[in-house]
């Protein structure tokens, strides 16, 4: 089966180890890959035969946005297997957001990655709506991949995404971590939302294969993408956990690659 890793963080080599440690400290989880560089990502994915990687990084200051996007652009140019998602920050003006998105589209980016908990904004806040208005005006599919859920914060509370998905039906959202890290019991809130998709990252180590199947069945297997949240997890272990979910081969093939290819027109 073809495998596309639809959720991977990468960092410049000079800060990769520090950034990886910071993520582990934030979640109080031992990172299975200690250095989050592009080369380590490819090495990790090669263990399971990953063909392509959806890569991104997160800006915690507005001044970091364009340098990070330039970094992702360069890494995509240097690695034909990479699919780039840009970053944004809520402190940018609406004009700056529109300009950065226009630049990203012209430079081959496929979407946007935002991390409300790191960036400290509410998904349904006034500043966040600048992102959705900009994407809605594009007139093309340009998904917004959102970190979702955390029982310590409510920035990315699932109900906030549901509210925005209904308000902006022409915007495609991807709710990471089965739609909500450590709040998987709330997954039913997404049922029936045509413009919300999900990835499997940073969830399968915490929920049972039966619970994973229940969520996939409830929301539709065609809405899910496989991701390992590099550098957090080892790709081999994540694939083993995914394959333990009692799904037929057609659904596995869809989640492992076909669904993301269809959405992004790869």
Image (cartoon, rainbow, N blue to C red):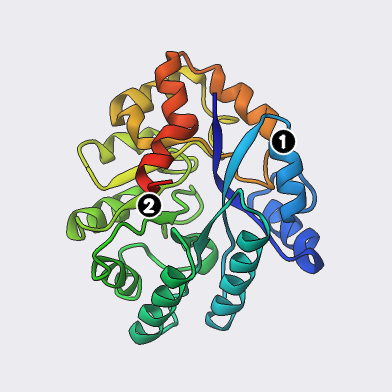
Query: Residue 246's spot in the image, x, y percent?
Result: 46, 13
Task: Specify whether residue 30 is in view.
Answer: no
For the residues labelled 1 and 2, the Cα–Cα distance comes to 34 Å
Q: Which of marks 1 and 2 is nearer the N terminus?
A: 1
Q: Is residue 9 visible?
A: yes
Instruction: Mark 2: give few (<14), some (14-19) or many (20+) Cα within 10 Å.
Output: many
Residue 138 higher or lower than 1, as above or below: below
Which mark is drawn over residue 157? Answer: 2
Establish if 166 lies above or below 107.
above
1 and 2 marks in contact (CB < 8 Å): no
Left or right, residue 134 beside residue 227: left
Q: In which quarter of the image is residue 57?
A: bottom right
Image coordinates of residue 15 in percent, x first then y, are: 77, 67
Q: Name the residue under label 1.
A: 46
Disc 1 secondary structure class: helix
Q: Residue at x 46, y 46 (%)?
A: 176
x 73%, y 39%: residue: 44
Callout 1 crowding tier (Cα within 10 Å): few <14, some 14–19, many ≥20: few
């Amino acid at each position: 089966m073809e495998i596309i890793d639809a959720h991977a963080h990468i960092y410049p080599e000079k800060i990769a180890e520090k950034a990886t440690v910071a993520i582990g400290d934030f979640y109080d989880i031992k990172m299975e890959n200690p250095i989050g560089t592009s080369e380590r990502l490819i090495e990790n994915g090669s263990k399971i035969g990953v063909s392509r990687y959806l890569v991104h990084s997160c800006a915690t200051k507005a001044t970091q946005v364009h340098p990070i996007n330039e970094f992702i652009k360069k890494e995509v140019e240097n690695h034909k297997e990479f699919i780039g998602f840009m970053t944004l920050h809520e402190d940018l003006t609406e004009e700056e957001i529109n300009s950065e998105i226009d630049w990203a589209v012209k430079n081959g980016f496929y979407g946007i990655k935002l991390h409300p908990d790191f960036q400290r904004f509410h998904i349904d806040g006034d500043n966040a709506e600048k992102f959705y208005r900009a994407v809605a005006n594009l007139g093309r599919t340009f998904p917004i991949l959102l970190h979702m859920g955390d029982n310590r914060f409510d920035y990315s509370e699932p109900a906030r995404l549901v509210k925005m998905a209904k308000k902006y039906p022409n915007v495609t959202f991807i709710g990471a971590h089965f739609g909500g890290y450590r709040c998987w019991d709330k997954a039913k809130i997404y049922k029936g939302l045509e413009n919300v998709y999900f990835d499997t990252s940073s969830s399968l180590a915490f929920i049972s294969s039966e619970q994973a199947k229940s969520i996939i069945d409830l929301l539709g297997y065609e809405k899910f993408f496989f991701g390992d949240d590099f550098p957090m997890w080892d790709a081999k272990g994540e694939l083993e956990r995914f394959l333990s979910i009692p799904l037929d081969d057609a659904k596995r093939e869809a989640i492992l690659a076909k669904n993301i290819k269809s959405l992004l027109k790869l």
